[in-house]
Image (tube, rainbow, N blue to C red):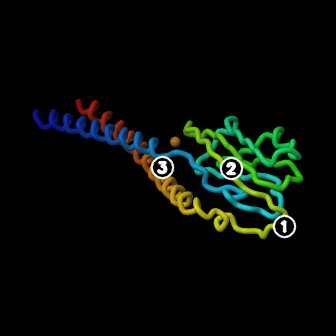
Amino acid sequence: MEPPMSSRRCWRGLATLILTFTLIVLWSGTAAAHTQLAASTPGDGQTVGTPPTQLELVFTDALVPEFVRVVVSGPGGGNPGLNNLPKPEVADMTVRQPLPTPLTAGSYVVGYRVVASDGHPLSGQIRFTYTPGAPASTPSAAIPSRAAGTAGQRSESDRAGSWATWGWLAGALLVVAAAVVAGRGRRAR
Ligand SMILES: [Cu+2]
């Protein structure tokens, strides 16, 4: 008489515990995962010797294509194409923005605003300089002061991203487990 009653209560307690844990995991998972700029071509702060025909921005999350905006400002005059850029191409985490050709030599600022598939917006900018004939340098070597910080942020966000993924998986499993437990508790009556 007593055992079935207390076992049902035990199942219910377990289900509540599982649901609570699931909610905490899901909440912390979504709070930790925000998209960031992972890489760009040209790199931020890079000087290039040949004029790039397009910009490539790679983010840490898939993007919502309709919300991607890229604005490029450059040397005054002689670059009317900058005010009339074609729409950027968006594929998953990558944005490709065609640039006017030929590109005028000088310094460029690329402003971007994107919305990740989780709904979080991100805006920022990178700079690059086109100096005809300048020696080609790798982007990482050409970002003197910000390279370390950017790389650190990137791996941190990757870690947060994978934790979020595991959180979702664990959460999904726990929800199923809780449903099974709740069903069993009801049937036991
Ligand atoms: Cu986010």
The reply to whether callout 2 and callout 3 are in contact (CB within 8 Å) is no
Q: Position of residue 166 (x, y in %)?
A: 44, 51
Q: Quadrant of the C terminus?
A: top left
Does dot 1 land on a helix, a strand or a loop? loop
Does dot 2 land on a helix, a strand or a loop? strand
Q: Quadrant of residue 2?
A: top left
Residue at image point 76% right, 53% down: 107
| Callout 2 amino acid | Thr
Q: Quadrant of residue 132?
A: bottom right
| Callout 1 amino acid | Gly
Mark 3 CB within 8 Å of ligand 1? no
* Neighbours of disc 3 within 10 Å: few (<14), some (14-19), many (20+): some
Residue at image point 75% right, 57% down: 129
Sequence order check: which comes first, mark 2 or mark 3? 2
Q: Which residue is mark 1?
A: 133
Residue at image point 62% right, 45% down: 124
Q: Which residue is mark 2?
A: 94
Instruction: Kindly report the distance in space between the C-alpha atoms of the residues bearing marks 2 and 1.
Output: 28 Å
Sequence order check: which comes first, mark 1 or mark 3? 1
Q: Quadrant of residue 44?
A: bottom right
Instruction: Choose between 98 and 91: the one closer to the eye.
Output: 98
Q: Which residue is mark 3?
A: 165
Instruction: Choose between 81 and 69: the one closer to the eye.
Output: 81
Q: Nearer the viewer, mark 2 or mark 3?
A: 2
Instruction: Kindly report the distance in space between the C-alpha atoms of the residues bearing marks 1 and 3.
Output: 45 Å
| Callout 3 amino acid | Thr
Q: Position of residue 154 (x, y in %)?
A: 54, 56
96 sits to left or right of 12:
right
Instruction: Choose between 93 and 40: the one closer to the eye.
Output: 40
* Neighbours of disc 1 within 10 Å: few (<14), some (14-19), many (20+): few
Q: Position of residue 188 (x, y in %)?
A: 24, 33
